[in-house]
Image (tube, rainbow, N blue to C red):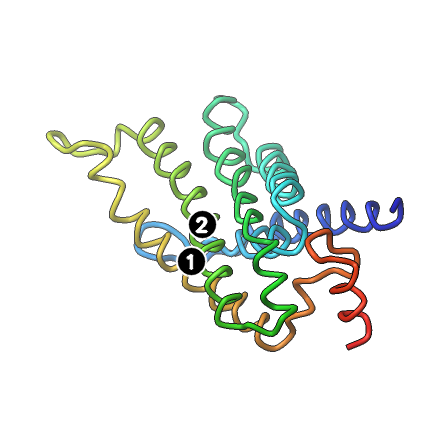
Amino acid sequence: MGSNSTKAWAETALFAVLAIALAYVTMPVGEYNLVFALLPLLFISLRRGMLLGLVSGTLTGLALFALKGEGTDVAGDILTQAAPFIFVGIAGFFAKFTQRTLNNKRFPNAALNILTASFFGTLVYFVWSLISDIFLSEEAVPAGVSAFAHFLPGQALSLAATFAVSAAVLLLLAKVSPKAFIPKDSRFLSRKEKSKLLND
């Protein structure tokens, strides 16, 4: 139990580090960017569940707050750098269903779970990003236009692109290597299912 727990936490930290590194990789989508950093957070959430997904997102957010924050506005730095990543781990709600359907070789059902998890994890990130824009970038809003209406189209485009790329990569991985989503010490499978998994 101890070694399994240690391995799970190590994976959680490792994927947070990967997310931090990918946060510096940018690809413009309109006025915003495709957010590659969400991919490792979505994956670890589906592999280890919601709790460790939230922990991985929190580690990512805190590290980016420390590394990219400007220091003059702590609340603003938390809102822009940390908060969007913290709740991506809600995608882990679908870990149990994803792992069981993959283990039972029901790929269409697993694909639906992966798509749903990717959508909600990505949506949470962009809701926080939109809130950040509305409260911290009011000076960029033209007179007579609401901040919500001004920032929403660009954020929605970035959300759609990020979701499409993340979901496509995760679906491809699930198709090619479904066991990548299922750790040997998975708490979402019964002992019988784990035994079958190890003997495959």
Q: Position of residue 102 (x, y in %)?
A: 61, 68
Q: Residue furthest right?
A: 2
Q: On the rendered structure, is 96 left or right of 197?
A: left
Q: Position of residue 164 (x, y in %)?
A: 41, 63
Residue ID for mark 2: 122
**Mark toward the start of the polypeptide (1 vs 2):** 2
Q: Position of residue 121 (x, y in %)?
A: 48, 48
- Give, as a three-letter code, the residue at label 1: Phe
| Frontmost residue, 190 versus 151 | 190
- Give, as a three-letter code, the residue at label 2: Thr
Name the quadrant containing residue 68: top right
**Disc 1 to disc 2, C-alpha distance:** 6 Å
Task: Reply above or below: 179 against 53.
Answer: below
Residue ID for mark 1: 163
Q: Residues within 10 Å of mark 1 (few under 14, many from 20)?
A: many
Q: Secondary structure at mark 1?
A: helix
Q: On the rendered structure, is 19 left or right of 112?
A: right
Q: Position of residue 51 (x, y in %)?
A: 64, 40
Q: Which mark is residue 113?
A: none
Q: Residue furthest left?
A: 144
Q: Secondary structure at mark 2?
A: helix
Instruction: Determine the residue positioned at 82% across, 45% down.
Output: 5
Instruction: Determine the residue positioned at 37% across, 52% down.
Output: 159
Q: Residue furthest front?
A: 192
Instruction: Determine the residue positioned at 40% across, 53% down.
Output: 33
Task: Reply above or below: 104 against 142.
Answer: below
| Frontmost residue, 97 versus 58 | 97
